[in-house]
Image: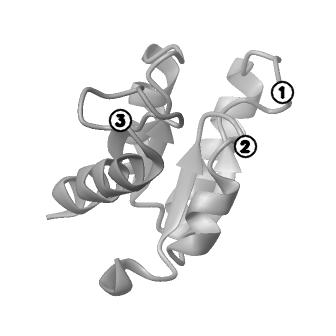
Amino acid sequence: MEPFRGMKVLTYHKSFDYFLERFGLVLAGTIEPKPGIEPSPTHINALIPRAKEQGVKLVIIEPNRPRKTPAYVAESTGAKLVILPGLVGGAEKAKDYFALFDFDVGQIVEALK
């Protein structure tokens, strides 16, 4: 992940903070303005130009999150949408924490090729 250190990303919810920190990625914002609060059109319309300005390359969401708005944000900013499980068992190959991190890192690297 070293080549991607400092890359700015958006997440749906503030659930990947430790992951981002560990791998040197920077949280540029969240689609969900506050935990449990659906994003309003006003929030999304303000988020997109900020994300473009900051050069956001990834929009990361969990499998259980709605996809319509994150897909729209990714398309509008030129970023890649990546769906990452945040918990063990969230993907077939993520049977323990090491496998989970391997899977998540692999998904990010593949998206950024």
* Residue of label 3: 95
Label 3 crowding class (10 Å Cα cut-off): few <14, some 14-19, many 20+?
A: few
The residue type indicated by label 1 comes to: Pro
Q: Is residue 40 visible?
A: yes
Rendering quarter of residue 91? top left
Q: Residue furthest front?
A: 96
- Picture layout, residue 70 above or below residue 57: above
Which residue appears at 44% of the width and 22% of the height? Answer: 63
Q: How many marks?
A: 3
Rendering quarter of residue 14? top right
The residue type indicated by label 3 comes to: Lys
Give coordinates of residue 96: x percent, y percent.
Answer: 42, 42
Which residue appears at 65% of the width and 32% of the height? Answer: 44
Between 32 and 63, the one nearer to me in the picture:
63
Label 2 crowding class (10 Å Cα cut-off): few <14, some 14-19, many 20+?
A: some
* Residue of label 2: 14
* Residue of label 1: 35
Give coordinates of residue 28: x percent, y percent.
Answer: 65, 60
Q: Quadrant of the N terminus?
A: bottom left
Q: Secondary structure at mark 2?
A: loop
- Picture layout, residue 90 above or below residue 16: above
The residue type indicated by label 2 comes to: Lys
Q: Is residue 79 visible?
A: no
Between 105 and 58, the one nearer to me in the picture:
105
Give coordinates of residue 39: x percent, y percent.
Answer: 72, 21
Q: Which numbered mark, 1 or 3, is in the foreground of this view?
A: 3
Q: Secondary structure at mark 3?
A: loop
Q: Closer to the N terminus: mark 3 or mark 2?
A: 2
**Would residue 42 be found to the left or right of residue 57 on screen?**
right
Q: How is the image coloured?
A: one colour
- Picture layout, residue 38 above or below residue 102: above
Q: Secondary structure at mark 1?
A: loop
